[in-house]
Amino acid sequence: MFAYDFRWSTIWDHRGDLLSGLSLTLQVAGLAFVVACVLGLPVAVARMSASPLLNRPAGWWIALMRGVPLIVFLYWLYYAAASRGWFALSEFRAGVLALGLTGSGYMAENYRGALQSVDPGQREAAQAVGLGPGTAFSSVVAPQAVRMVIPPAINLLIGLLKGATIVSVIGLADMFYVARTVSFETFSPFELYTAAAILIIGVTLAMAMCTWFVERFLARSER
Amino acid sequence: MTHVLADISFGPVWDQRSLLLGGIWLMLRVAVVSMILAVAVGLLLARLRLSRLRWVSVLAFVLIQVLRGVALYVLVLWLFNGLAVASGITLSAVQTGIIALSLLNSAYLAEVFRAGFEAIPAGQGEAAQAIGLSDRQAARFVLVPQMVRITFPSMGNVFVDIVKDTAILSVIGVSELMRETQRWAQFYFRSFEFYTAAGLIYLAIVVAVSAGWRALERRLRVHLDVDTIDRRRRWRSMLPAADRTGAPA
């Protein structure tokens, strides 16, 4: 029976690599969130359009982005597109794009849910008191919708952060990549994987706690 | 410069159809077993969460929140490369995958079930007690059946997520669809064809599973009266706002 030799000092010895790995994961998730928010809005607007020329393709986009696993997108963008010579992305960009695209499908639904949760009477009333359609949207509908979209948007950010851990499969030097490569030399996978897991779970939990406070803050004016 | 679509051939994908189908079959089996275990553990966690003992309820709450913060990829790697090596417990890749998938999703289901139980009017439990049912009988014949009908659509979302998430198990070598795809894409140097095919297969399976779940839901709705639909609305308003829409897996 072999005994595992615990050497917790390996974590401290490689703290620099682990922390820069964590920073990479956070960057990927953060940038992907921006991509998702920007790309999701036109998709949501198209999805809500009365014209089938707009809402059908938007529906397909959402189904595609939500139906295909993230890891498949990642491999497709990193290996498949490059093998055709269409475009070659760095690991970092492939990660941001894959996460951002999948996120756009979810974010579009978040925007749509938020916009539809605003009572149509609000817009009608705004127009009845003489506001133009643009002003009615920007100063009556949008401020109410934004409050509704914040909690699911933070939830999406947490989801993207969890998803961003996968990016090491295409070779981005995040914490799990560091844990794997360093444990080849030191043979201490348990310590390194545990450290990496605790760090990323800590960040996710901290963000989840933010949602509770934000939800409570937003609910304060609701009756 | 050659045309962007020149020299695309899906022939190799078709040649390997039996192994890819084997990958799909394994993926579906893993997903179904994980879902069953996740429902069982989820019910247990929801029961603990609703316990009258404050410390039990708080402990269950903390456990649920922590599990919800864990990424599947992280748990799978930790179990397979970390814990297994340190403890000497050797689990197969498939077993590790099923444990990780069911554990993480049980936490989601626990919150869904908890809100579902709370959406049932208190009168139902009181009436069950009044006609002499034991706590266990009341749960089995009165409360759980109503909770299942209320939360059924959300259970479907969790199942679809589990099906999609099996793709992550490829990283520890479970030879499900994604693993088979990677293997043959490298073998033939045909990344584009194999990954495109895999994406479309996943999409088709997800669409089919969602449609199948909705068909099940319609069959359940035979017994679904206006009250239950109203309870489902109450239940949704009891979920944290962030849970009313999904996040990517």
Image (spheres, grey):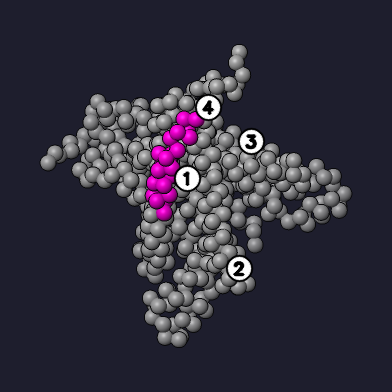
Of the pair A52 and A223, the residue shown nearer to us: A52
Residue furthest out toward the left: A1
Q: Are marks 1 and 3 on the same chain?
A: no
User: x and y percent of residue B123 in the render?
Assistant: 52, 79
Chain for disc number 1: B
> Which residues are the magenta region?
B11-32
Q: Secondary structure at mark 1?
A: helix
Is residue A169 or residue B13 the one in the foreground?
A: B13
Magenta stretch: residue B26 in it?
yes
**Residue at numbered disc 1:** B164
Evaluate whether label 2 is on the same chain as label 1. yes
- Chain ID for label 3? A
| Marks 3 and 2 in Cβ contact (< 8 Å) | no
Q: Residues within 10 Å of mark 3 (few under 14, many from 20)?
A: some
Neighbourhood count class around disc 1 (C-alpha, 10 Å): few under 14, some 14–19, many 20 upward: many
Residue at x 39% of width, y 70% of height:
B52
Number of the label disc, if any, that sits on residue A39 = 3
Q: Determine whether label 2 and label 1 are within 8 Å by CB.
A: no
| Pointer 2 residue | B229
Magenta-drawn stretch contains A138: no
| Residue B55 as seen in the image, left or right of residue A56 | left
Residue that numbered label 4 is attached to: B9
- Report which quarter residue A206 is drawn in: top left
